Amino acid sequence: MSGAVRWTYAFVDRPAALCERAGAFWAAVTDTRPSVPRGEQKEFVTLLPEGTDPCVKVQGVAGGAGGAHLDFAVEDVPGFVEEARRLGGKPVAVHDGWTVLRSPAGQAFCAAPWHGEAVRPPVVAGSRLDQVCLDLPPSAFDAEVAFWSALLPKWSARPGSRPEFHVVEPPAGLPIRILLQRLDEERSADDGDGAPVSAHLDLACGADVDAVRVRHERLGARFVARHPHWTVLRDPAGGLYCLTGRDPETGGLPPAGT
């Protein structure tokens, strides 16, 4: 398959004025160092791990509060873009070698060339940033599940642990997976960044959610809410994200009774 996904990146999207603050926080969380900023507005920073390949980037956005999105590193960018278009996605910006698209519900994602990335970064202090969660209004949920399942045929798409979740998990070795979450209520385009869908980052922490929370708060995060299986925090740039009880090595839930 010429458009096969060979690597994935989670993007931390934050307001441009707070991008440096966000980069410093997420570099500390992931035990990485920020690259030299690049892009026309110096809006992109890659978080570089030691001895492995990067899978997290930070982007300063001109409007809105930001959120998260995925980049897919593929063997054939035009082929991947055309397949996304056929399935209901919409290319919105074509750059030199890479393309920005939106899913049927409006979630941004990018197709970019694969540059040989292959070695996943390790678990850091009991946690791993390994998931982008799409927060979807009920009317968009089924179509988004169908879109992502069809766009990524070699990934495992299955219902999650709760009725409102659907997991799209990559083959072994790829660092970032997708969780689709059905919200309780509809949202208008004004509730998100120009679309009724938004996204946030999730970290897998296993049984160490409380310890990871303490570490993140020391780095500048703020507590928002605690739920039975995840804790919501806000990073120093204002972005929401979650610490989950999933296994940081496998990304899955721990065995029942543990």
Image: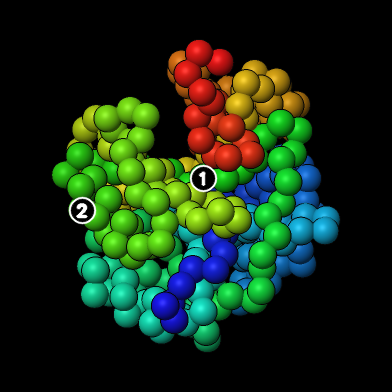
- Write down the residue under mark 1: 131
Q: Residues within 10 Å of mark 2 (few under 14, many from 20)?
A: some
Nearer the N terminus, badge 1 or badge 2? 1
Image color mode: rainbow
Q: Nearer the viewer, residue 216 or 88?
A: 88
Kind of residue at badge 1: Gln
Kind of residue at badge 2: Ala
Among all residues in the image, which is located at the extreme left? 139
* Residue 235: image location, x then y, percent: 61, 36
Split into 4 quadrants, where in the image is the N terminus?
Answer: bottom left
| Contact between labelled residues 2 and 1, with CB atoms less than 8 Å apart | no
Q: Residues within 10 Å of mark 1 (few under 14, many from 20)?
A: many
Task: Answer above or below: position of 179 versus 127.
Answer: below
Res. 143 mark: 2
Alpha-carbon span between mark 1 and mark 2: 20 Å
Res. 239 mark: none
Q: Please identify the quarter of the rendering in which residue 250 is found.
A: top right
Q: Nearer the viewer, residue 48 or 19?
A: 48
Q: Residue at x 24, y 75 (%)?
A: 86
How many discs appear?
Answer: 2
Q: Is 133 left, or right, of 118 in this rendering?
A: left
Q: Please identify the quarter of the rendering in which residue 165 is found.
A: top left
Split into 4 quadrants, where in the image is the C terminus?
Answer: top right
Can see residue 17?
A: no
Badge 2 marks a residue whose secondary structure is helix
Q: Residue at x 31, y 75 (%)?
A: 83
Can see residue 204?
A: yes
Task: Answer above or below: position of 68 versus 77.
Answer: above
* Residue 62: image location, x then y, percent: 50, 61
Q: Residue at x 49, y 68 (%)?
A: 5
Badge 1 marks a residue whose secondary structure is strand
Task: Answer above or below: position of 38 versus 165.
Answer: below
